Amino acid sequence: MIRTILSVIFAALYLILGIPVLIIEWVIGKFNKRAMDISSLRMVQWAFRVIARICGIRLTVIGKENIPTDQAVLYIGNHRSYFDIILSYSLCPDLTGYIAKDSLQKVPLLSTWMKRLYCLFMNREDIKQSMKIILQGIDYVKKGISICIFPEGTRNRGKETELLPFKEGSFKIAEKTGCPVVPMAISNSASVIADHMPRVTPCHIIIEYGKPIYPKELSREDRKRLGIITSETIQQMLVRNQELI
């Protein structure tokens, strides 16, 4: 429980002490928005790495060289734990907004930081609102901001190597912008806390990035199967990495 308490205390202090930082960043943004964005990104990445260290996570990253650094991408990953966000976000090379459930928008300070970092809040039960969020994601990618989506729609509590059906609407961002899809397989993240709430347990987590998939390079038939192709790629990585955990 010590790790749980320490990580919660650190997160709370970061959010509280970060209030004046948000104000300073806002002022910086009036003169140089890019500087504000990158500064906010690096500070949150640092905080996430500290939380991972407190929790005793040993992280192995495979295939980071597969992430294009000259354009925005659409990260597609499997989802089993909130640590999927904490760990993968700390690895993003540039500005990246995550599509999160809309309930997080009600959390004070956390939602402020998330909005600052281009995160979008989706209500998957509201088709009209979901479409609006996807359109916003398309606009972000066109402006050079990557987007990360967990298209299973919720945390998967099944077998480690099995995926829930992907929501095809998630891939509209890549289809409309032509940006590369980067498959992201996260193995063993539920072992940190999700499998035994609220106790944090040190563990080994693997994140593997597959080779980018460029929608415009696919045949018309494969473009219709983009979600299935990505899902199969992630599942193959999950199965392969079971040997490394």
Image (cartoon, helix red, strand yellow):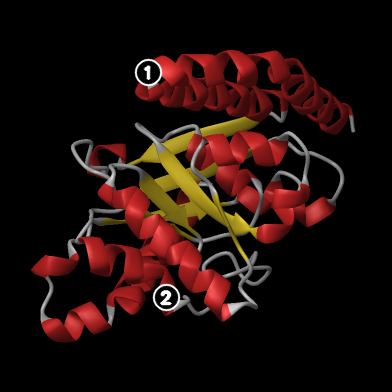
- Which residue is denoted by mark 1 in the rendering? 32
- Judged left or right of residue 179, residue 152 is right
Residue 14 appears anywhere in the view: yes
Q: Where in the figure is residue 166, as x and y percent of width and height?
A: 47, 75
Q: Secondary structure at mark 1?
A: loop
Indicate which disc residue 113 carries: none
Residue located at (40% from left, 51% from top): 147
Q: Is residue 129 above or below residue 220?
A: above
Assess disc 1: are there few (<14), some (14-19) or many (≥20) residues with their C-alpha within 10 Å of its C-alpha: few
Look at the numbered disc 2 and give the secondary structure of its residue. helix
Residue 108: x and y in percent read: 78, 39
Spatial CA distance of label 2 from label 1 is: 34 Å
The residue wearing badge 2 is: 169
Q: Nearer the viewer, residue 124 or 162?
A: 124
Q: Quadrant of the N terminus?
A: top right
Amino acid tagged 1: Asn
Figure quadrant of residue 19: top right
Residue 213 lies left or right of residue 16; in this view the side is: left
For marks 2 and 1, the one nearer the N-term is 1
Q: What is the x, y in percent for residue 141?
A: 31, 50
Residue 240 seen in the current view = no
Identified at 42% across, 41% down, the residue is: 96
